[in-house]
Image (spheres, rainbow, N blue to C red):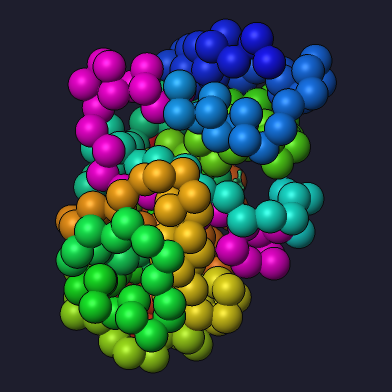
Amino acid sequence: MTHNPSIAQELDQAAKTAIPVAQPSEKVNYSLDEAYHIQNQLIRLRLDRGEKITGYKLGFTSKAKMEQMGVHDLIWGVLTDKMEIKSGAEIQLDKYIHPRAEPEVAFKLSKDINRQLSLDELTDYIDKMAVAIEVIDSRYKNFKFSLEDVVADNCSSIGYCVGEWQDLQNDISDLSIKLKINDETVQHGSSKAILNNPFQSVVELSRLATISGLTLKAGQIILAGAATAAEWITPDSKISAELKNFGNVHFNVH
Ligand code: OOG
Ligand code: MG
């Protein structure tokens, strides 16, 4: 496929200008491998401008998300320092195209991972976890895409806001998780919705990273994927997420 660099550039430009573009799959056929290659080129453009990789995100690890977006496979993307929204900070809505927020579980790696791990050994590689909010803002018109399109677009990711890091708990497989707008619950689910156990997201990422020859590094953050459907972000609001035993986190929208 010869269009790769221009797709990455178009997506990069769309994010910078907050003007959406058409889905590449409307014009060309491309494979999932090619889509990850485009994602890689897109991230490379940003690293060349000085951004630093801070971690990775999983997408479509819950049925609620797959059904909301009409796609059926787990995907992964890259987080950079520029995407961090500090806990309690304010974001400017006009910098985004059509942003949505979703409640997530975040992990912090304590050791490098360069092979596929099993669920049993995983807790040796993670030392902290927290409640988080991911902001997604598809660069495609109407927030519509194929699986390849969304992978090329770094899985819609644009921001992440992580609560206070806490020590790991052994059983996190059924914790209540909520997304609130102006302190009103708009989504309520369980961490069980995330692959039956959010730790499983890290197992999956270790598998996919190994296939790509990528080492996950100590100190990096992993977003396990939303437990519920995402909600549109409204102007002049407070967006918060709450995870049982792990407190809450919020940011404000102007
Ligand atoms: C793609 C990103 C999915 C998740 O947590 O499932 C995702 C999208 O919904 O636009 O981040
Ligand atoms: Mg997400």
Q: Where residue 245 sits: x, y (%)?
A: 31, 85
Residue at the bottom extreme? 171
Can you say whether 81 is above or below 27 in the image?
below
Magenta part of the chain: 42-66
Res. 202 image quadrant? bottom left
Q: Quadrant of the N terminus?
A: top right
Residue at horizontal 30 percent and vertical 53 percent from the top: 216
Q: Quadrant of the C terminus?
A: top left
Residue 110's spot in the image, x, y percent? 18, 66
Side of 132 where 101 appears, left or right: right
Residue 45 in the image: state x and y as whole percent. 37, 17
| Pick the front one: 2 or 199 | 2
Quick check: is 73 in the magenta stretch? no
Query: Which quadrant of the figure has residue 219?
Result: bottom left
Residue positioned 61% across, 19% down in the render: 20
Q: Is residue 75 above or below residue 240?
A: above
> Which of 10 and 227 lies nearest the eye of the viewer?
10
Residue 64 within the magenta-colored segment of the rendering: yes
Q: How many marks?
A: 0
Q: Nearer the viewer, residue 92 or 128?
A: 128
- The image shows residue 152, relative to residue 41, as above or below, that is below
Q: Position of residue 27 (x, y in %)?
A: 80, 15
Closer to the camera, 44 or 80?
Answer: 44
189 left or right of 92 in image: right
The structure residue drawn at horizontal position 47% and vertical position 86%, both measured from the top left corner, is 173
Query: Does residue 154 appear to the left or right of 239 in the view shown?
Result: right
The answer to whether any part of residue 63 appears in the image is yes
Q: Is residue 187 visible?
A: no
Q: Residue at x 33, y 81 (%)?
A: 121
